[in-house]
Image: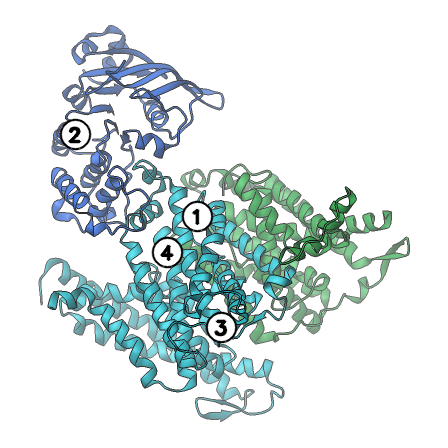
Amino acid sequence: MIIFLKKFGIWLAAVLICVVLPLIFRSGFSISLLSQMGIAIIFALSYNMLLGQGGMLSFGHAVYYGLGGFLAMHALNRIGAGTLPIPIELLPLVGGVAGVLAGLVFGWLSTARASTTFALISLGIGELIAASALMLPSFFGGEQGIIGDRVVKLTITGFRFGKQIEVYYLIAVWMLICVALMYLLTQTPLGRVANAVRDNPERAAFIGYAPRTVRTLQFTLAAFFAGAAGGLFAINYEIITAETVGAQASGSVLMMTYIGGVGHFFGPILGAILITFMQLSLAGVTHAWLLYFGLLFVGMVMWAPNGLSGIIMVHEPVWKARLMKRLLPAYGLIALPCLIMFLGAMILIEINYHLSLSINPENPMHLLGITFRAQSPVAWGLSLVMMVAGFFFFRKARSVVQERWSEVSQTLKGGLTR
Amino acid sequence: MLEYIIFSLLNSLVLGMLLFMLSSGLTLIFSMMGVLNFAHASFYMLGAYFGYQISTAIGFWPALIIAPPLVGLFGALVERYGLRNVHKYGHVAELLFTVGLAFIIEEGVNLIWGRNAVTYPIPKLLDFPIFTLFNTEFSAYRMFMLFISVAIFIALYWILTRTRIGLIIQAALTHPQMVNALGHNVPAVFMLVFGGGSALAGLAGVIGGIFLVTEPAMAATLGPIVFVVIVVGGMGSLTGAFVASLLLAAIQTFAVGIEYSLSDLLALVGIRAEVGGILKDLWRIQLSHTGPILPYLFMVLILMFRPKGLMGKRET
Amino acid sequence: MSTTALKLADVHKSFGSSKIINGVNLAVAKGERHAIIGPNGAGKSTLFNLISGFYPLSAGYIELNGHMISNLPPHRINRLGLSRSFQVTNIFPKMSVFENVRCALLWPMGYGYSFWHLCDRLKKINAKAEEILERINLADRRHIPAGLLAYADQRALEIGITIAGNAEVILLDEPTAGMSLSETERAVELIRDVTTGKTLLVVEHDMQVVFNLADRISVLVYGEIVATDHPDKIRQNPQVQEAYLGKESA
């Protein structure tokens, strides 16, 4: 029993969380947020099959997501019209098939080399598909996109998917299946050899593998999951536009995955949850959310290139050695100036947005429950002072953190305690 | 027809030289530092907005002088305090840093100047037709752009072939490790090239922002085209970038005027067919509408079949 | 000739106008340990790269167990039973030591591009990987990322990867380069052990190692083989003495 729990506990917990969450957060907003998170998790994990596991930096992964979505939407409309006998629960498979077909073709074309050449080809293919989407209106629906109706007669579970909560559970089930499959794929010969090709393609050829074939297969499998996520997108929104295949969608999955961390399997899951949450909650509160998102991303690239999962995993040995209590005070110390710096920057950003975007900049603005005029020198001065002071104390605190860290890692290495 | 050809040629020359101002900096940065700078077109955008802002305050001519060095300075600071710190994490991180930077610059421009295009007019001194041919006018401003870009081209050529720093840059293009080993301050050269490339992009923005449009999406529109130029021309080859700039400008300019579709083409040789379903769009697209995809198609094909580009010596 | 494992016939290679390999003829018998020596720049590494398919030939042909392998891509040559190591350590740095060895076993043991088997369930492969780790003395460090191993251990791992697939013909490119004396001794023992019953072609600078290990030696000078013979004869060959041994090692 204990062995069973140790092996499958985390999966049981995941299932439990998926079941319980919508019972706790019952508002319409939370349910649709959770649904979007589910889709984003699949998409980000599929992206990490390329970047993290295969060493392929793609700027066009949304192509497979979008094509999957479009094909699924066309299929949905046929199902609704009674001309296609596929139950709606299996619609993501249609998206997946679209992903596989596109992935096989474009994957083979782009994987002769990895690195910059691959990145540029993926960018080119992405722009190509996005530009053609507007030229081929019968498939992509032009500017308006294609709409569908997910309430169809053909279901196997008996649900009609009229309510968002039913859609949520469908997404959750598919999400769990896809996550499990993608995890298992990392454990297969292909998954391991994809790592080998990422690390050292030349050497991989001398243990019998053609790097291009390995990359193409990995790419195609990733495209399958991206397409499946696209299929869920079609069901969830009932509308799909050319934007889904575009550069922005490709860019945001890249950022999500990277912020979550590409080095660990669960990293992209964190990224998808965090970014989707930011997307939906911040976008309603501030116009500047994309700027915050960009700053977060650049901050991660500069100071935490292993992403959130990297930050967490670096603490694993510390946690096991019960040394966290030595680090936490230092973290508390550095959190304060960070917060001050961030608040200062935020005030400045919000003031500027107010000035450039509101109808009458003379109107008072509201921020954190305080109402003030955007032109007020007090606000400007305060934000600048906060930023400068925050930065000053941040640097001080950083040396404390570094000191603590070197102490802790000494202790870990030598096993000596003070 | 002759009128169409002459004006298309002139316009592609203007656009092509503008592209070259951008692509020359980008290709130099890539071949020296190995960084594909996704923010390069963002520097172009900054140039346009700085130009616009300074023009409205003190006029176009001071803007032309002040804005490019400002952008160059910004670029140098980005290299010194951003890129150089990321360098230790490898090329992917460097590339992603520039992606994020492009993102931030776009949002920053939104923040300061708003989401709509700004009115950045042609300076009064140049707002007249310089000549009229077959009833079509060619504006003095375009002629001025051509003049500036040719001057820059000559200056760049002179710097790279006649000055000491130019020779170091040229050597670093082909043998970056060797230059380092010879004891030149390579980080300083990097900062210089990055700043210089950014300044060129800024200049292109100051004059191109009037010619095209000055809006927050301008970087995202032009950025990929500049990538296409340096890939087609061959990474690290300035001559290649020059030829590819003109070539791509010509393709884009000429394609706009040709209104033939696949069905017209087949009709010429006597095949007439009606195609239904999804393919019918493909059948009816006029060549003039394929303008946006041609460059990317070109780039993907080059990368697959001739990764060195037209004139490049190294593979990407 | 069924007893010839590897045959090079009139192999040429030039880069641009410079000729690096100039008509090399070589036949390595099955089960033989054959060393190639020669001064720096003689073309030893180029020769390895030609045999393993890293570079295309300019002229001539190469046979492996009677199969024509000239100009096949590296992975095809590997599948025909030839495995090689590299002069510069060439492992999979971010993967664990165990994973490095296991990956080298997957193709030879028939799992190819499978994405429907789970590696941990492949008992035979895991047992074989364990056995190899024992042989190269890295069993206790199996979970460490290979990039963090000490240099000599990385070289040992490289040999482990090279021999894992049970290839009949093994090419080792300077396996002891950069090692201390005691490390070299252990490496030679290891090589002797793991190549028993196999055909070995080795490039090596350390004469001690060469004379210790090789059944026959070929001397490569300026892209040509000037002599092929048993170690004792090579030692006495005046041509070799002049070209090579006379100056570098007494």
- Residue picked out by circle 2: C191
**Could you tell me which chain the residue with mark 3 belongs to?**
A
**Which amino acid type corresponds to the residue marked 2 in the rendered image?**
Ile
Where does the image place residue A404, in percent across and percent down from the top left? 21, 68
Chain in blue in the render: C
The one of A215 and A253 positioned closer to us in this rendering = A215
**Could you tell me which chain the residue with mark 1 belongs to?**
A
Above or below, C233 relative to A75: above
- Residue picked out by circle 4: A49
Cα distance in 3D space between marks 2 and 3: 58 Å
Above or below, B180 relative to C203: below
Q: Residues within 10 Å of mark 4 (few under 14, many from 20)?
A: many
Q: Residue sitting at 31 percent across and 32 percent down? A: C78
Instruction: Say whether marks 2 and 1 touch (CB < 8 Å).
Output: no
Q: Which mark is residue A115?
A: 1
**Residues tagged by mark 1 and mark 4 found on one chain of the structure:** yes
**Which amino acid type corresponds to the residue marked 3 in the rendered image?**
Leu
The one of A275 and B115 positioned closer to us in this rendering = A275
- Residue picked out by circle 3: A291
Q: In what element is the residue under mark 4?
A: helix
Cα distance in 3D space between marks 4 and 2: 37 Å
The quadrant where residue C104 appears: top left
Of tags 3 and 4, the one toward the viewer is: 4
Of tags 4 and 2, the one toward the viewer is: 4
Cα distance in 3D space between marks 1 and 4: 15 Å
Q: Earlier in the sequence, mark 1 or mark 4?
A: 4
